[in-house]
Structure formats: structure tokens, C-alpha cells
Amino acid sequence: MAAAPFDVLTTTASELQILLASGKFTSAQLIEVYLVEIERNNGYLKAVICTAPKHSLFEKANALDRERSSGKTRSHLNGLPMLVKDNMDTHPDLGMDTTAGSFALAGARPKKSADVVERLIEAGVIILGKANLSELSWFKGSRTICGWSAVGGQSQSAYVGGGVRDDDTFGGHSNPDGSSSGSAIAVSAGLTPLALGTKTDGSLIMPANRAALYTMKPTIGIVSQQGIVPVSHICDAAGPMTKSVLDLAHLMDIIVDPAKTSVPPKGFASVMTDTWAEIRVGVLDPAEWKRPDFFTRPYEANVALAGHLRAVFENYTAGLEDSQVYTLEELVEFNRKHSETELPPRYPKQDKLEEALATKLSPETLDATLQHAREMSRTKGIDKILKDYNLDIIIGPAESSMSDIAAASGL
């Protein structure tokens, strides 16, 4: 094909929408452009676990092109391709597994796509493929190098040459960080104009920071968690990876459930301003808030996550057909039996899963632990600082314990 009339590295989704609206390019041509980019660069970036079958991609793109020709557009992202993190269910008809990076979930058949994926499809977005991730959203083994999964391999930042260094720490700057690593890499490297990731703790903010992208963790509950391989329903949220704030706003318009929160009648972009006037900002001292040499998280929140994992994982797998595992015990045993792929020398741990199995706290104790974490992180933490200093926003380093506090707070 002829060279695309845009730079895949810098062109935003909103700019692509203008190109489509002009009639100078089609959705089918966009699919071709991004499939070529994935073929060219994913071999070493390992940002994409799989793409949808070509025939179905072009069938969907051609149908949306016909709709556009007849004057119909479904959303501001109509006709654009995007990747979703491979912990979001896609119905078997879409031709892609949902593995969360684990071979234990390969071949399992969800009965429907995740709610957030269905909302994207209804809005005219084309699901190009599934993004790599830290396996099981980094809740498999402690201090496992970020961006690795058994299915997808070790992903690499588009901004770092030479791959992840052997002498680097698991969260060091030679790796892409967080668990939504493939989503961030793919957008920054021009393999897709948009992507969705998920976050329990720092898994949106940290990889987006290293990929120079815009993201946000929506308030827990306003984006459906149905059909997403979980870590904890008390902390998990799906969120956008984009090259511009406008793209972020348009993607939030689609994924946010208006029944769960207030959405501006004309969309989030309608309330964007060009000024910080009348917005009070508090800034954390980076020297005091920088992340230590190893990841930390408030103890109470960690206990609560371990205590909830078995229940939420088994609730998720109960909705699958033909899964190789249905319980957390079966997952741990699968990894032991397939240690050559699931627990290789550089990634040998599954102690987080084993800890979750060993956690025998009562529901009352778990609830008390969670409430203490909420009180210390939200009531006596974030909310108190906002009130005491009359602030609207707290700004701090992306790679700091602020993400831990926010996760523990439930915001």
C-alpha cells in the first residue's frame, strides 16, 4: 500500500477522525496501516499478544465506511481501530482469546464480551487486537519484571533500546512499568491510535508516564468491571491510553456508564478549558515522594487484595466455558506443571497467588482491614489534604507512593 498520509507516532485519534470525515482515508485503510506497523515492530516490542482475524477486521471496517458514506457516525471515535488489554473478555466470535497473559486461560470461552468492549463496539470502534500485560495484572509473583507474560513475552518500551537490562530492578527504567505495559507501548510506538488498560494500583499511570501518554484511573465503579479478569473489585478500573487530552475525553464518553456518575450532556470534551484559573493545585515534593528502590503498598490494602483474589477470580472463571482452570488452586497447580513456560528462570515466582491461597481471614476481618485502609488513605489522607489546604488537585510524581495511597483509598 502507499504510505499513509499521517505520522503513526504523533497523529491523534481526533486528527484521524478528521481525516476519515474528509473522505481522504477510510477505516479499512487505517486497519491496513496499523496491521503493517504491528507486523513491522511488534517482534521486538512485544506490545501486542494477538490481532483479530484480518477478514473480520476488514469486514467491520468496510461496514463502518459504508455507514459513514450514508451520513451515519456513532461517536467521536467511529471507525477507528484500538487495542484492549488482554484481561478484557472478547466473545469468541471476535476471534481472540482472553488470557491475562497466562496459558492457563488460553482457549477459555467467555459467554460475552466485557461490558466495556461492547460499549466500544457499539460506538463504532474496531477492536484491532489484545495488548500484552504483566501476567495476571502483576498479581502473580512479587517483584516480577513489569511487562512480562508467559503468553506475550517481555514487552519493551518504545523509548528504551536494547530491551530490559539483566541488572535492572523489576520496576527499573529499562522496562515499561505497570501491568498495562503493552497498551502504553502500542500507542506510543504507533501500533494503534488508542488503547485501554486497567489499573489496580499503578498500572495505568506508571506505564503511561514512561510512554509519554495521557491516562486516568476512572473512579471505581463508573466503568463496568464485568468481563475483566480481576485482581480486586475494590480497586480495579479500566482506563484510557491516548496521545491527547481530547482523545482521552472522547474515550471516557464511551466507557463511562452514565447511570453511575454525572456525564456532561455534550460529553467530557465540552467542559474542557484552556485555563487553570480558579483551580487550586497542591504539589508534592518529588524528593520526598519519589518511589523507593522497590515497590511498596500500604499493608492493609495488600492484605485486602490477597483476601479478595480467590473469590473474584473464581467468580470470573465461573462465567467461562472450556477453561483449563476454574479455581485459584487449579491456577497455581497449572503453573507448577507448566513451569517451563509459566515460571521460567527469569520469572520464577507465583507467591502472590500462593499468598492469596494461604489467606484465611474472615469476611469481618477483611472488611475491617479494608475500612482501615480507606480511613487512613482517603479520610485522613487525600480528603484531609484537599480540605485543609483548600485544594482541587494534588500533583505528584507518577512513580511514587501516591498511586498506592489512591489505590488504598478506593478512589
Image (cartoon, rainbow, N blue to C red):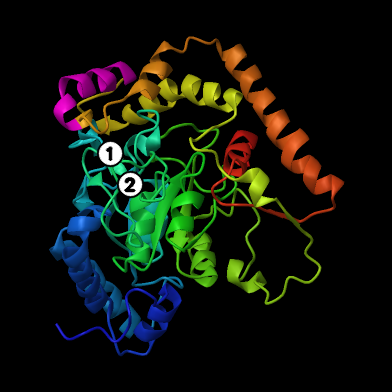
Q: Name the residue under label 2.
A: 113
Q: Where in the figure is residue 296, as x and y percent of width and height?
A: 53, 32
Q: Does the magenta stretch include residue 332?
A: yes
Residue at (43, 22) in percent of width and height: 311
Q: Where in the figure is residue 132, as x and y percent of width and height?
A: 29, 48
Q: Does residue 322 appear in this view?
A: no
User: Is 199 drawn above or below residue 118 in the view shown?
Assistant: above
Q: Nearer the viewer, residue 409 or 318?
A: 409
Tell me the amino acid under the disc marked 1: Pro
Q: Could you tell whether 131 is left or right of 388 in the image?
A: left
Q: Where in the figure is residue 232, as x and y percent of width and height?
A: 48, 31
Q: Which of 174 and 343 is in front in this view?
A: 174
Tell me the amino acid under the disc marked 2: Ser
At numbered mark 1, what does the secondary structure look like: helix, strand or loop?
A: strand
Q: Could you tell whether 365 is left or right of 357 in the image?
A: right
- The magenta stretch is 328-341
Q: In which quarter of the image is residue 105?
A: top left
Crowding near the residue tagged with mark 2, few <14, some 14–19, many ≥20 C-alpha atoms within 10 Å = many
Q: Which of 79 and 295 is in front in this view?
A: 295
Q: Is residue 178 magenta?
A: no
Residue at (27, 52) in percent of width and height: 163
Q: Where in the figure is residue 313, as x and y percent of width and height?
A: 38, 27
Q: Could you tell whether 210 is left or right of 346 in the image?
A: right
Indicate which disc residue 274 carries. none
Q: Name the residue under label 1.
A: 110
